[in-house]
Amino acid sequence: MEYADTERTRQLNFTRLPLGQAKEALLLLHDLPHLTVLSTVGDTGLLIRYELPYYTLEKIELALIDQGFHLDNTLLAKLRRALSYYSENIQCQNLSQPPQRERTRRIFAQVYEHHAHGDHDDTPPEWRDYR
């Protein structure tokens, strides 16, 4: 059986103003299934743990933005966020795919079905005995 690491621990960083965003987000995220708020990080951060594909960092952050929260938008934060979004989306796509062995078998089965079988030779008869 293949092991899929679907648990993620991430830090959400908010802007300094308005004050108290991390504590408000903690109260909002506290009761969600498959998501645990581990701790606050200073005045502007939250450390969370969640399960893919139930949640992705992108979905969590978009939900917080919809609720009026302001995320840290420094260049480094944007780069980290983009990398996390990309890797989690790829992993969610891979989780929805059948195992590699099954995909490979289906591909070869399709190729075999479309392949001409038997002793078929496209070489013209006059070229077959040419020496």
Image: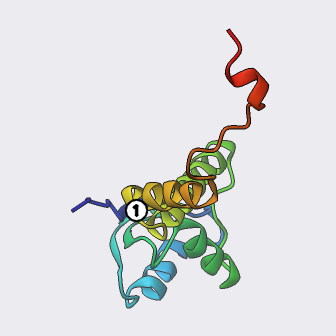
Asked whether, in this view, residue 6 is left or right of residue 58, the answer is left
Count of marks placed on residues: 1
Question: Does residue 123 appear anywhere in the picture?
Answer: yes
Q: Which of 75 and 9 lies nearest the eye of the viewer? A: 9
Asked whether, in this view, residue 53 is left or right of residue 74, the answer is left
Question: Residue at image x 37%, y 61%?
Answer: 9
Q: Residue 112's image quarter?
A: bottom right
Residue 1: image location, x then y, percent: 21, 62
The crowding category of the residue bearing disc 1, from other C-alpha atoms within 10 Å (few below 14, some 14 to 19, many at least 20), is few
- Establish if 67 lies above or below 110: below
- Establish if 6 lies above or below 27: above
Extreme residue toward the left, this view? 1
Question: Residue at image x 40%, y 62%?
Answer: 102
Asked whether, in this view, residue 34 is left or right of residue 59, the answer is left
Question: Residue at image x 67%, y 20%?
Answer: 129
Element under disc 1: helix
Q: Which of 52 and 70 lies nearest the eye of the viewer? A: 52
Q: Amino acid at mark 1?
A: Glu
Residue 81: image location, x then y, percent: 59, 54
- Establish if 73 lies above or below 96: above
Q: Which of 128 and 36 lies nearest the eye of the viewer? A: 128
Q: Residue 99's image quarter?
A: bottom left
Name the residue tied to disc 1. Answer: 102
Residue 68: image location, x then y, percent: 69, 81
Extreme residue toward the bottom, this view? 31
Q: Quadrant of the C terminus?
A: top right
Question: Residue at image x 38%, y 72%?
Answer: 50
